[in-house]
Amino acid sequence: MFWFWKKLGNILITLFGVVTVIFFLFNILPGDPTQMMLGQNENSEQLIVLKKKYGFDKPVFTQYLYYLNDLSLVSYHSKNPENISFLKENKYNYFSLFENKNSFIVVKTPYLRDSYQKNGVSVIEIISNTLPNTFVLAFASILIAVFLGLFFGIISALNKNTWIDYSIQLLSTLGMSVPSFFSAIVFAWFFGYVLNEFTGLNMTGSLYELDDYGENMKLQLKNLILPSLVLGIRPIAVISQMMRNSLLKVLSKNYIKTAYAKGLSRFNVVKNHAIKNSLNPVITALSGWFASMLAGSVFVEYIFGWNGLGKEIVDALNKLDVPVLIGSVLTISIIFIMINIFVDIIYTWLDPRTKNNF
């Protein structure tokens, strides 16, 4: 129980810090969101109306407090026609907790506000439409990284200081040093354009696309191949190196020597004793890499035209759509926290001794 409350407190403090940093960071970006919304139809009267509607006429710190109020599970509202009308429009589900003559306090679902650029579409709706595509891409990438990374790491460790080991380490170093956006451009051009006749792959495309008649959305799994490979290159290299080093360390332990002395074959020793005990540092890397893939897929999604949260973040940056930016970053932060909690649970399965730390 103490572990639960400790984790909950850490989560709330972390989320509060994330919200605070990203709110002030994105609200000092150069440019005026209201001018972006109006475009060529801009005039001074409309600018004043929009600034008042979205609270841009108030100091930034006051805007920040209003945002926290919207985001909080428990929020305060004054009894004026605008607030009452706002709640009745079902912007979020709520029930009144306390009420007096001038104000009321409600318990509600968090409200991430509406997009500035998409005609009142809620940020939650935008995230719910794009996050699954990003999750599919990140999951496919991490599966590729785990399978190939563990395979190469084990092969490298079992062939220490041979040409196989040196070749795998060289490829791993190259994989870690090449930026994802550069790999994305090269892969899209080479496999999607130069070798298109043989691969049948497209340079750009998302998980679902309109059919030839423009009526129905059609699943296009082939569009997942190139971006998932590109996104998985760097974690493949990291996992391979970590698995190699961890496995070599485990293979030097006394209990491994004892297993050999009992007559077990090398295959059984590695499979039944060494690999499982080598996975702890790899699991740590996986948790960080999976979360970073959700955030780091921004350029990969944009280059491949993958309709995910990363591409949405780039579009929101170009259009100064601050609610979408803050909501997207906050969502990724929550996922990162949940992944870390899941990894803590996995640790207790891999090494029961860690239960004392929770």
Image (spheres, grey):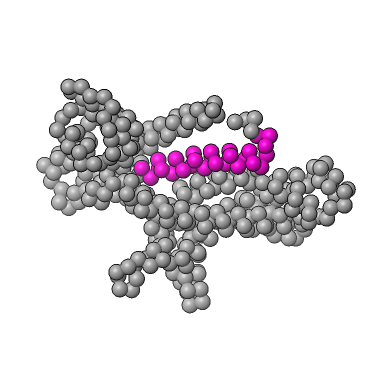
**Furthest-top residue in this view:** 101
In the figure, 225 relative to 239: above or below? below
Q: Is residue 33 left or right of residue 247?
A: left
Q: Quadrant of the N terminus?
A: top right
**Furthest-bottom residue in this view:** 197
**Magenta part mainly helix, strand or loop?**
helix
| Residue 81 visible here | yes
Where is residue 76? Give x, y as percent: 27, 27
Q: Is residue 346 in the magenta section? A: yes
Q: Quadrant of residue 104?
A: top left
Task: Name the residue at 28% across, 39% down.
Answer: 93
Where is residue 85? Give x, y as percent: 17, 37
Where is residue 162? Give x, y as percent: 77, 58
Q: Is residue 335 in the magenta section? A: yes
| Residue 230 visible here | no
Task: Name the residue at 67% across, 57% down.
Answer: 151
* Part of the protein shown in magenta: 327-354
Q: Quadrant of the C terminus?
A: top right
In the figure, 275 relative to 57: above or below? below
Task: Name the residue at 72% across, 57% down.
Answer: 155
The one of 318 and 282 positioned closer to us in this rendering: 282
Task: Name the residue at 62% across, 57% down.
Answer: 147
The one of 4 and 276 positioned closer to us in this rendering: 4
Q: Is residue 161 left or right of residue 340?
A: right
Q: Is residue 254 left or right of residue 25?
A: right
Q: How many marks?
A: 0
Q: Is residue 92 left or right of residue 244?
A: left
Where is residue 184? Give x, y as percent: 48, 60
**Furthest-left residue in this view:** 45
